[in-house]
Image (cartoon, grey):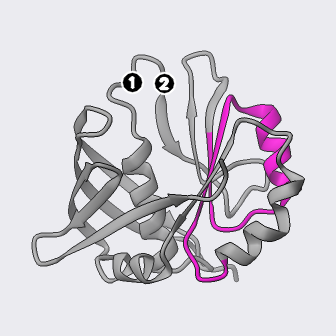
Amino acid sequence: MALKATIFKARLQLADMDRGVYADHQLTLARHPSETDERMMVRLLVYALNAPADADHGALEFAKGLWDPDEPELWLKDLTGQIVHWIEIGQPDERRLMKASGRAGRVTVVGYSASTPIWWSGIATKITRARNIQVWQIAAARAQALAELAQRSMQLQVSVQDGTAWVGDGDGSVEVSLVRLNP
């Protein structure tokens, strides 16, 4: 018998001063049986960092990245269904990234483990011809600290200013900065 996803609910209060995005989001996250709290919380943070100000041109959605090899972790589609932004979490291979580069106007990858620099050094030269790919890294210790905020029902505040995000739940907070790995 296959294991089922665990459902998490998050009320996200977002104040992104860098992009001028201020919104409340009610989110439902399905955590795949093979997914850790750390990865799920990175997905939630990446959602907050990429959520559009409004849905006039499409909405950012959680996709089936772990279930379906033809989908990312998150994507923003315009009102016609075209993929505007394809977002991967972790360390996808270069074939997946090149395919995504052809399908979407913009591709973002966010690595969060200590091995991210090693992975990046192995694929950096292989994806240079794709100009629409951005690769970012979250320090492994910060991603692990995010995992400590995970609960089945969460109320999180995310503030972003000068490239730094603060994620809090009322009892504690985690400061996270993303470092861009490619020029």
Identify the image quadrant of the N terminus: bottom right
Q: Position of residue 99 (x, y in %)?
A: 85, 43
Amino acid identity at mark 1: Ala
99 in the magenta segment: yes
Decide if residue 78 is on the left or right side of residue 53.
Answer: right
| Kind of element beneath mark 2 | loop
Of residues 182 and 119, the one nearer the viewer is: 182
Magenta highlight range: 86-115
Crowding near the residue tagged with mark 2, few <14, some 14–19, many ≥20 C-alpha atoms within 10 Å: some
Q: Quadrant of residue 77?
A: top right
User: Residue at the spot x=28%, y=77% of the render?
Assistant: 149
Q: Considering the numbered disc 1 on the image, is that residue within a helix, a strand or a loop?
A: loop
**Residue contact between numbered discs 2 and 1, judged by CB atoms under 8 Å:** yes
- Pick out the residue farthest to the left: 170
Task: Using the image, determine if residue 110 lies above or below residue 97.
Answer: below
Q: Amino acid at mark 2?
A: Gly
51 vs 170, left or right, is right
